């Protein structure tokens, strides 16, 4: 499994990429592997201000539904429209075309407090 070094990670298996004060968020390679084939992504929180660790949507796999937790506080700006027709992108490209949301981060310094790729790799073994 891969955990790109330029990303930060959460214990809930989300990744975040910060560019200025805009962040792109998705689930990790480990998470998509554990869930199995993703068949649906449901995110209805665009335009909302959410706290860190608040649920921003769900991801449905063949056998389960899992909540998606926001890594840091901020406002959701955009949902990856490709996932509506191609949810399997989360499985095939979790760090690229399979991203889930973009948000404006309330405190960019909060991203630095999240796990590095090494710490996340140690967490998932």
Image (spheres, grey):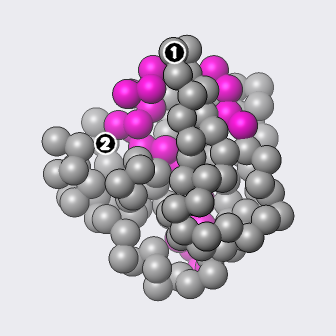
Quadrant assignment for the C terminus: top left
Residue farthest right in this picture: 47
Residue underneath mark 1:
63
Q: Residue at x 61, y 70 (%)?
A: 51
Relative horizontal placement of residue 88, taking residue 125 as reference (left or right): right
Relative horizontal placement of residue 39, taking residue 26 as reference (left or right): right
Q: Residue at x 52, y 22 (%)?
A: 64
Q: Secondary structure at mark 1?
A: loop
- Out of 114 and 67, give the one closest to the viewer: 67
Q: Residue at x 66, y 73 (%)?
A: 74
Residue underneath mark 2:
2
Disc 2, disc 1: CB below 8 Å? no
Magenta segment: 18-42
Spatial distance from mark 2 to mark 1, Cα to Cα? 24 Å
Spot occupied by residue 60 in the image (x, y as percentages of width and height): 60, 26
Q: Is residue 26 magenta?
A: yes
Spot occupied by residue 38 in the image (x, y as percentages of width and height): 57, 24
In the image, residue 39 sits, relative to residue 101, either above or below, namely above
The reply to whether residue 71 is in sight is: yes
Q: Residue at x 35, y 37 (%)?
A: 30
Spot occupied by residue 89 in the image (x, y as percentages of width and height): 59, 30
Crowd band around label 1 with a 10 angstrom C-alpha radius: few (<14), some (14–19), many (20+): few
The reply to whether residue 22 is in sight is: no
Q: Which of the two marks, 2 or 1, is nearer to us in this view? A: 1
Relative horizontal placement of residue 47, taking residue 1 as reference (left or right): right
Kindly indicate the quadrant of the structure image that contains residue 66: top right
């Amino acid at each position: 499994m891969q955990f790109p070094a330029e990303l930060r990670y959460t214990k809930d298996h989300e990744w975040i990429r910060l560019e200025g004060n805009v962040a792109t968020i998705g689930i990790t390679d480990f998470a998509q592997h554990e869930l199995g084939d993703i068949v649906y992504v449901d995110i209805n929180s665009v335009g909302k201000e959410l706290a860190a660790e608040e649920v921003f949507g769900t991801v449905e796999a063949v056998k389960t539904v899992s909540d998606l937790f926001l890594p840091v506080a901020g406002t959701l700006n955009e949902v990856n429209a490709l996932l509506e027709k191609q949810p399997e992108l989360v499985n095939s490209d979790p760090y690229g075309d399979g991203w889930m949301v973009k948000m404006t981060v309330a405190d960019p310094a909060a991203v630095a407090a999240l796990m590095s790729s090494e710490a996340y790799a140690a967490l998932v073994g």
